[in-house]
Amino acid sequence: MASHLNYIAITPYKFNPPSSSFSLLHNPPSLFIYNHLKSLLSSFSLLSVSSSSFSPLIGRSLATSTMGDILADSTMDAVQRKLMFEDECILVDESDNVVGHDTKYNCHLMENINAGKALHRAFSAFLFNSKYELLLQQRSATKVTFPLVWTNTCCSHPLYRESELIQEDVLGVRNAAQRKLKDELGIPAEEVPVDQFTPLGRMLYKAPSDGKWGEHELDYLLFIVKDVSMTLNPDEVADAKYVSREELKEICRKADAGEDGLKLSPWFRLVVDNFLYKWWDHVENGTIKEASDMQTIHKL
């Protein structure tokens, strides 16, 4: 209930006379809308809402939303805003036990991350073609966290839904990876069968994006070798390209030197620095399953 109220409270609307229909705004609401929302929030008697009315696993409730939040988040891209408030991430402890669920919005607020309330499951998929080149993507400019940075093929979250909570053989996470490869890169599901993803390991990391947003994830690392077709979704991906080992090393060098404004996502860089090249050997040798270690959670 709290997440739905949070969505209603934070999403700005425009009244279009003479009808009573409402539409989403990209720009900050007018003074009329501001006063309307203020009145609306007041009608909920926010100050009298007890925090005990909500599950402690829900993060920020309507009662703790501020008018500053509403005005600031009204500038968020409409597609990203929808995902941030409708998608429910899987909350876990540091041993990867499920402890609850919350919106992507709440899970990526630094105030919740710093308070230890936002650790959630994620995955990072690495797709190689038959020439053993790795597919990279550049995140879209409208991404809330880490816009326009380069990263591995696909990075996202299994959601709090039956098909993506399945623990056996990491099936829930594999299902999520197949879904997001379609959503972000337009790769048909039949080209990336879930049984062809190889889970290689898990890592726990924390990374701020800016003063407001960040990541605190228990990240599943999945590899797959397939030649695929792509149709990029511009709401998610600005660019994509295959790279060889040497090309990736040059990209890392440029990112370290600050050349061309090139930036890499922190989770991708952790994988590059700790695992990627030795796992790449296994990809080329056809022995990738021998590299799998799903017992250890690497705290990086």
Image (cartoon, rainbow, N blue to C red):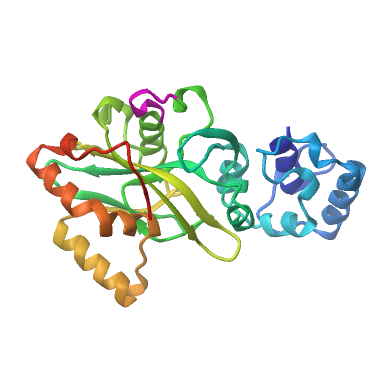
Q: Is residue 95 visible?
A: yes
Q: Is residue 85 magenta?
A: no
Question: Which quarter of the image is occupied by the N terminus?
Answer: top right
From the viewer's perspective, is residue 112 above or below residue 149?
Answer: above
Q: How many marks?
A: 0
The part of the chain drawn in magenta is: 166-172
Q: Is residue 50 above or below residue 34?
A: above
Query: From this viewpoint, which residue is outermost toward the left?
Result: 285
| Residue at (75, 40) in percent of width and height | 22
Task: Find residue 183 and report its image quarter.
Answer: top left
Residue placed at 36% from the left, 29% from the top? Answer: 170
Q: Looking at the figure, which quarter contains the C terminus?
A: bottom left
Q: Is residue 15 visible?
A: no
State the image coordinates of residue 119 (x, y, percent, origin top left).
53, 46
Q: Position of residue 259 (x, y in %)?
A: 31, 76
**Left or right of 172 on screen, residue 253:** left
Q: Dividing the picture into quarters, in which one does residue 250 lie?
A: bottom left
Task: Answer with left or right where residue 185 lies relative to residue 198.
Answer: right
* Residue 206 drawn at (x, y percent): 47, 56
Residue at left 32%, top 59%? 269
Q: Nearer the viewer, residue 68 or 26?
A: 68
Vertical placement of residue 168 versus 278, above or below? above
Q: Nearer the viewer, residue 72 or 176?
A: 176
* Residue 103: image location, x then y, percent: 61, 41
Question: What secondary structure characterizes most of the magenta part?
Answer: helix
| 299, 197: nearer the viewer | 299
Q: Is residue 130 above or below residue 135?
A: above
Quadrant for residue 62, please give it.
Answer: top right
